[in-house]
Image (cartoon, rainbow, N blue to C red):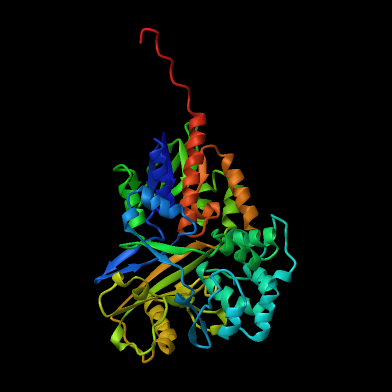
Amino acid sequence: MRVAVVGGGVAGLTAAWHLHEAGLSPVVLEASGAVGGLVQTLELAGRRLELGADTLVTQKPAAVHLCRRIGLGGDLVFHEAAAHATRVLLRGRPVPIPAGTNLLAPTGWAPLLRSGVLSWSGVLRLALEPRVAAVTDPAHDESLASFFRRRFGPEMLEVFAEPVLASLFLADAERLSMRLALPRLLEAERLHGSVRRALGEAARTGRPHAGSGGFASLREGLGMLPHRLAASLPRGTIRLNAAVERVRRTEQGFTIALASGVELVTEGVVLACPAHRAAALLSDLDAPLAAELRGLEASSCATVHLVFRRDEVEGAIEGHGFFVPRGAGLPLLACSYVSEKYPERGRPGDLIVRAFVGGARDPRALERSDKELVAQTQQALDPILGRRPMPVLAHVQRHDRAMPHFQVGDAGRLERIAARTRTLGSMTLAGGLRGAIGVPDVVASAQAAAEELGAALRQQAPAPFPQAAAE
């Protein structure tokens, strides 16, 4: 059975790999000239630069398991999550996130009091979190800002939650859906009445919780993942520069019309592309479904790599990088010290900085030229790096409408999209179309999509022709 997979990013490649393992014949249609989507590793002048995602959260194991299944187990590199390695820019300086505060929520108030990063009133508000009335409705949703303000107070939101979480999701904290972005914190409140109580219980019992554990990468960069997936598929499975224009239903299944004029007839389809692309492909097939897909927003961003000579940097380089609060007034979301996190990614004597710009905080960032993006990043880093060093290398990578920006209410929209897609027969969704954010969730969504489609196709398959008695 032939299946078209629209999109050659990690979602599409993972779905194709699982379909192939199940005995189906996928064809991956990728509009660009390379596979990988947002997961790309660039070799440039002896440095290895991650243009998109650079880590896998090990607390969500789907991506790590996939790496092992496709023969990359020996290339996995694991790191323990360390609070001191992650910092937040406060009063112009990167300040370590205090012990007892993971990236998602605080587990105690005493370390924050000793650190001095919160006022007395902010620490007191945090200490009272277990007394805040819990929302127990399992269908409840609210924005990230609303949740943290309600449970921990406005100062905790402004100092930690907004810079860290809004940056990770490239989102507006006032609109980002907790139900889709951080459902486990809502669950912690609902089941335990307090997030701090839930995290403390998890710590005592040894059970993992949201934000615990560590992270992983691949020895030569996460780009190894899509390239190994592609190499694991039969020759001819992947078609590059194969932009899809329309998907139509036929008696045999679907007709896939390419921009080149070629048409493919397939028995099933996996959509693993951005929502705005899926809406365009399905506009003739199902206008209401296309309208729902258009309602899903996405954020754009750029990664700016700057390589400095370390001996020319006067400022102290501590930790693995820092997040930037909205109130700092800088055109950056976050910065990562790549050479501190992964020393093997650069040359001896390098300081490699990767900055993120854009997102919902600066939606017009991609309108600026590469030269302007590099210049504004250098200027923003001046107070931290000291005397302005000149980079020996700079690289800008743009990601247009790349990150799903799920808002309050989008959980219901995704349910309607999934239900309406099922009415079209042997078509499934993967990646952001299924509510996935981040590589581990994308991998899990693609596996689920492949399993669903395989089951649907097996149900539709005609019974084998009965053999003659003589045979």
Viewer-closest of 241 and 26: 26
Viewer-closest of 354 and 96: 96
In the displayed structure, would residue 93 be above or below residue 458?
Answer: below
In the displayed structure, would residue 425 be above or below residue 304?
Answer: above
Which residue is rendered at x = 37% and y = 66% of the image? 51
Report whether residue 34 is seen: no
**x%, y% of residue 286?**
57, 44
Horizontal arrangement in the rendering, residue 303 relative to residue 390 (left or right): right
Viewer-closest of 148 and 169: 148
Q: Residue furthest top?
A: 470
Q: Quadrant of the C terminus?
A: top left
In the displayed structure, would residue 36 be above or below residue 233?
Answer: below
* Quarter holding residue 264: top left
* Quarter holding residue 187: bottom right
In the displayed structure, would residue 361 be above or below residue 32?
Answer: below
Q: Quadrant of the N terminus?
A: top left
Q: Residue furthest right?
A: 133
Q: Residue furthest bottom?
A: 387
**x%, y% of residue 167?**
52, 71
Which residue is rendered at x = 67% and y = 64% of the image? 142
* Quarter holding residue 113: bottom right
**x%, y% of residue 182?**
59, 62
Horizontal arrangement in the rendering, residue 424 relative to residue 20 (left or right): right
Viewer-closest of 90 and 30: 90
